[in-house]
Each structure stands twice: as structure tokens, then as C-alpha cells.
Image: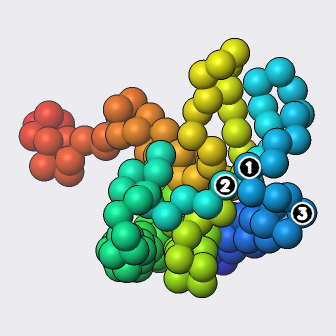
């Protein structure tokens, strides 16, 4: 996957994430629910913490803590994505998804001090924490990365191939 395509995926995720968050933030009242199916609502919520509202009510220091972590992770992923070989298509897709989501949430954290969530999935009376497009991209990228790590066959090293050929 060429560099331009990799970073286009990142940009597309960031744009889609920001567009949907702006829509949810302006169109909905806090915690207003719009039922979509029997297991899915659109509802606005602010997350001042990390995933699953971890450290949500800690008084504000977590904003800068998670901002710094997001900046560092985004820089590392951006460099990694740039250095990948053209043949590493699935790995570059996984990293592009994670990077796009990280940048999308980073923008919210810097701009507002919280992340706008609006997707709510539930079953009967059990609700999964609300999330957004960036969170979904991070989750999909992470699952793809895990699958690649667990199931992708590595190429034999050149020394091993030479030894076996003799």
C-alpha cells in the first residue's frame, strides 16, 4: 500500500470522525437517545477519560496525560506507517486505522478537553460504553493487528534457507 493511500485512509477516518462528532454535538442534547434498532442508539455523551471512561472523573489532569500519550503514540504510528514496505498491505491498513482513530480523539481532547461519543450499543438492559468513529477505527485496527500477529506466517530467514539448501 503506497504512502499516499495509507495517509489517505488516516485522513478519511479523521474527517469522518470529526464530521460525525460535530453533527452529534450540535444536533443532540446531552444523553438524548435516538433509537435506531433494538440494540443500537445514537446518544451524545462526553468522555473526559480514556477508553470505557477510564479516569473520567479525576479532576482534569487526565486530559493532558491522555493528550501527551496520544501525541506520542500518533507520532510513533505515523513514522512506523511511513517506514513500512509496500508489501505490508494488511499491517499498514491496521496501523492506518489505529492512527486515524488516535488522531480523531486527540483533536477532541486538545480542542474540547473531552471526547464526543455518540454510538450506543446495548442488549436488553445491558449497555456497552458509548463510543465514536475513532474508537471503532482503533478497535478494528487493533483486531486486524492481533489477527496478523497471531496467524500470519513469517518468512524464513535467509540463513535458514541457505542451510536447508545445502
Q: Is residue 37 visible?
A: yes
3 and 2 marks in contact (CB < 8 Å)? no
Q: Quadrant of the N terminus?
A: bottom right
* x then y, percent, for residue 92: 52, 59
Check disc 3 and report the residue beneath it: 27
Give the residue furthest to the top: 124
Q: Residue at x 49, y 64 (%)?
A: 48
Horizontal placement of 5 versus 27: left or right?
Answer: left
* Secondary element at tag 2: strand
Q: Which residue is mark 2?
A: 45
In the rendered image, which residue does mark 1 sit on? Answer: 31
Residue 148 occupies quadrant: top left
What distance separates the C-alpha of mark 3 from that of mark 2? 12 Å
**Looking at the image, do the residues carrying marks 2 and 1 touch, with CB atoms under 8 Å apart?**
yes
* Viewer-side residue, 125 vs 153: 125
CA gap, disc 3 and disc 1: 12 Å
Q: Nearer the viewer, mark 3 or mark 1?
A: 1
Amino acid at each position: 500500500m503506497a504512502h499516499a493511500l495509507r495517509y489517505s485512509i488516516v485522513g478519511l477516518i479523521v474527517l469522518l470522525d470529526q464530521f460525525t462528532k460535530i453533527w452529534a454535538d450540535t444536533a443532540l442534547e446531552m444523553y438524548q437517545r435516538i433509537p435506531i434498532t433494538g440494540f443500537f442508539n445514537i446518544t451524545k455523551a462526553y468522555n473526559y477519560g480514556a477508553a470505557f471512561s477510564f479516569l473520567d472523573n479525576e479532576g482534569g489532569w487526565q486530559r493532558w496525560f491522555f493528550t501527551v500519550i496520544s501525541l506520542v503514540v500518533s507520532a510513533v504510528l505515523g513514522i512506523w506507517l511511513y517506514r513500512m514496505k509496500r508489501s505490508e498491505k494488511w499491517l499498514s491498513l491496521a496501523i492506518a486505522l489505529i492512527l486515524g482513530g488516535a488522531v480523531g480523539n486527540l483533536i477532541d481532547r486538545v480542542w474540547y478537553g473531552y471526547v464526543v461519543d455518540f454510538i450506543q450499543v446495548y442488549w436488553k438492559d445491558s449497555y456497552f460504553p458509548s463510543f465514536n468513529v475513532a474508537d471503532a477505527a482503533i478497535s478494528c485496527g487493533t483486531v486486524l493487528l492481533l489477527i496478523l500477529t497471531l496467524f500470519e506466517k513469517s518468512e524464513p530467514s535467509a540463513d535458514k534457507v541457505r542451510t536447508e539448501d545445502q
